[in-house]
Every structure is written in structure tokens, then in C-alpha cells.
Amino acid sequence: MADYIVAIDLGTSHLTGIVGEKGADGACSIVACETVKTDDCIHRGMINNSKNLANHFIALIQKLERNLKGEYIDKFYVGVGGQSLRTVDHIESLEVAGGMTVTEDDVDYLQEKCRNFKPDLLDVLGIAPAVYFRNGNKVEKPSGEWCERFEARYKLVVGRTMIRNMLKNSIELLDGKELAGIIVSPLALADAVLSPSDKELGCALVDFGAGVTSVTIYKDGDLQHLCVIPLGGRLITKDIRALKLTEADAERLKKEKGSATVSKEDENESILIEMEGVDRQIKLSDLNAVIEARAKEIVDNVHARICDVIELNQLGAGIVMAGCAYELRYLPELLKEKCNNMNVRPSTIQNGLVQGSDEMLGNPMYMMAISLMLKGTEPCIFPRFEKNTPDVIVDLLIDDKEKNDKEKKKKKDKPEKPPKVPGEGLIGKLKGVMTSNNLFNES
């Protein structure tokens, strides 16, 4: 049986699940891809309701399994990218007076020490490949050479401990499903869309999501920094609602008419909004003025985070943009202007990583899920008879309110007992006996 990888992207607006068949050469073919709305169980990339998320996992898995012809999803990978994610530096070293020859065992020893490191109040969610130094000099091949001090410098991706805990709580509510692993979404995306040349020359990958915007920076082939800005496309939608629009209308207008900058032509155009009762019009300039204010705030934050780490002229490969929010008109131009007219280009999955499905490779809705799938290594799907599983997955979990409503309905449908007749109790019966004319009468 072929190795199938299942991965789920935890987006603020949608969960995206994907099933891919991994070939011997590491390339994947997409077998199924589905989405479900999150309904606010995820806020800025953070899980805020484990039970609701479990419901969405079940709904998404059911949709994916309908494409699998009787096979069963046993486990799946989950990508995380919430607002608390960031990189911290960590160094492990060996030092021997008189010198030593570095061996592969020494390299493995430092890696094991790094994996066992536990920072205070934080959880290590990912570890970028180490950069090795012998006697203070960077080296490509760590073993086989003599030195007095050998260092492995790591970038740890850390986040709040609740990220892993809330995710585990959700998985435990699923019947027969396991967590194959947690993948740091921005790093997976970088490996999928950035070439080795991009990372060598210097590149900033900016993922504009619905809830957050992540910035991942590479130089000389190594990860330099990762951070998450708690601003995204959903915040723009919320701002537009201040124009007295519903959320649905605000989201629609952002996609159809919205722009990250206001033009002179916008003053002459009005938009008709069909509403219950009375239709109303708003100026396109008013709409785009709201969008521009928030878009500039996001771009300013991206620019500041990049400049905190590296000079813009060190990014030889420029800036690569990803995420659904980057499709906002003139957002790339706004970022380019802010970053001294640096080259800004859209992302796409590198050639050779995924076979077929060309229409999905450049679609920001699926790009993150595809990136997570490519990082998976464990088979996630088995025939149903091997797992002895039912043909139908259990019903969705219900929350306490729904459970209480069902209990009330049961009580309502239950036949009522006939009302008691006054005087029929024990005292009433004794009273009746005491007042009977036959009391103490002899037969």
C-alpha cells in the first residue's frame, strides 16, 4: 500500500485538510483536499475552544474520507502558527583542553541536548537545522576536523504551552484518531516555496493570513528569525463593518472592490449595498480609506520586524508574499514602496515537489496545507478492515448547552403523571377511616 500523508492547516477562518500520496522520490500527488469554516474556535492562530475544534476535525476528516474509497484516516499532522510563535537562540557546545576531533556521535549528542532543553514558561514547537562552528568559525561539515571548541547554534521556535495542550485536548476527543506530529507552519511554507538560492541570497517570506501575519527571514542558507504579528485580513473586514455593513458584505466588498491604497478615481464611484428595507450607497473612497489605514499598519509592522533583524539591502532575493490576504489589490505595491522598492513577488510551490494539481499550487487557500503535507513522514491512512473501524464515524460531539436542550426535550415528551387528588395521601386515608360510620362497629 502507498504511503499517504494527511495534514491539517489551522487557519483563523478555515481548516484546510489535505491527503497526499508520497512517492519514492519524495514528491507528492494530491489525493483529496477539503475545507471547513472554523466558526471562531481559532483566534489569531490560537485554539480557544478544544471541543469545537474537535467537531471541526471530525467534519473535515469525514469530507476527506469520502474521497478515499473505503480507507480510514488513522492519524494526521497539524500545522501551528499562532501569534505567540517566535524564534529564540540556543547554543550547545563541547570544549576540550588540548583539542579533539569532532565525530558524528558528538553532533548527535548536541542535538539530543537541544531536544531535551525546556525553556521556562514556553514550549519548543520546532527546531531549525543547526549552524556549526569550530573554534568560532562557521563550517558546513561539522565532523572530521580537530578543534578545541565545537558549537551547534540553534533557532528554537517557541510558543505558549497552551498551543500543544489545547491541540492534544481536541485530539483526545476524537474516537480512534492520533496526532502524527506538530509542524511549525511558517517553516514548512518556507521550505516549500523558497529555493536554496532564495535562502542563500537572503529572503523574507511574509504570510498574510486572516488572523495573523508571519515573517520568516533567511540569509546565507540559514533561518535568521521568525515572528508572528497579531494583525491579519479579518481585522480589515472588522474595520469595514464600521461603515454599517454586515460581516458578509464587508468581506465581499473587501475582495471585490477593496484596495490597499485610495486613488483619485475612487471619489467618483459609489457602491450599492442591497439591504433589508432600504438599499444604501457608500463611496468607494470611504471603503478604501478604511482598508488603507489598516493595510499600512500591517505593512509598517512587517517592515519594522524585518529591519530589526537584517538590513533591507541584505535581502538579495527580496520579499516573497503568501496567504489569502495578500490578494488584496495594491498590497504588494504598498509593501514594495515601504521597503525601498525592493523586489516583491507572490509565492508558489517549487517545481518537482508536487505532481499535477497545477491549479492548486499557486492558490493561497491550499498552499499552507500542501506545505505541511510535504513535511509529513508517517503513513496516516489504513484500510478499514485493518483498524476494525465502523463504516460511519461517530456523530459530532455536542456541547453542554445542546445536551441540556436535549434533556429538556426528553422531559417535555415524557407523559405526565395524573395529578394527585387532595386527601389521597396517607394522612387523608387515615382521616377517612377515622370518620367512617363503621368504625368500632361489631359485625
Image (cartoon, grey):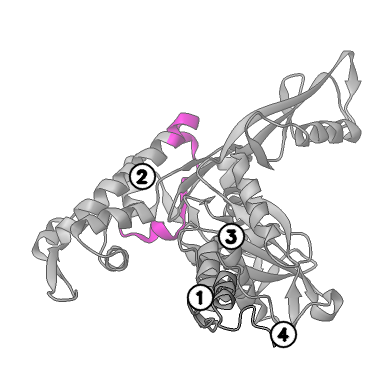
Give whichever of 290, 110 is nearer the camera. 290
380 magenta-colored: no
Q: Which labelled disc corresponds to residue 51? A: 3
First-in-chain label (3 vs 2): 3
Q: Which residue is mark 2?
A: 298
Q: Which residue is mark 4?
A: 69
Does residue 312 appear anywhere in the picture? no
Contact? badges 2 and 4 (CB < 8 Å): no
User: Amino acid under label 2?
Assistant: Ile
Label 4, label 1: how far apart the Cα atoms are: 69 Å
Q: Which labelled disc corresponds to residue 423? A: 1
First-in-chain label (2 vs 1): 2
**277 sits to left or right of 404:** left
Q: Identify the residue at horizontal 64%, vertical 78% (top origin).
A: 440
Label 3, label 1: how far apart the Cα atoms are: 52 Å
First-in-chain label (3 vs 4): 3
Kindly state the secondary structure of the residue where label 4 is placed. loop
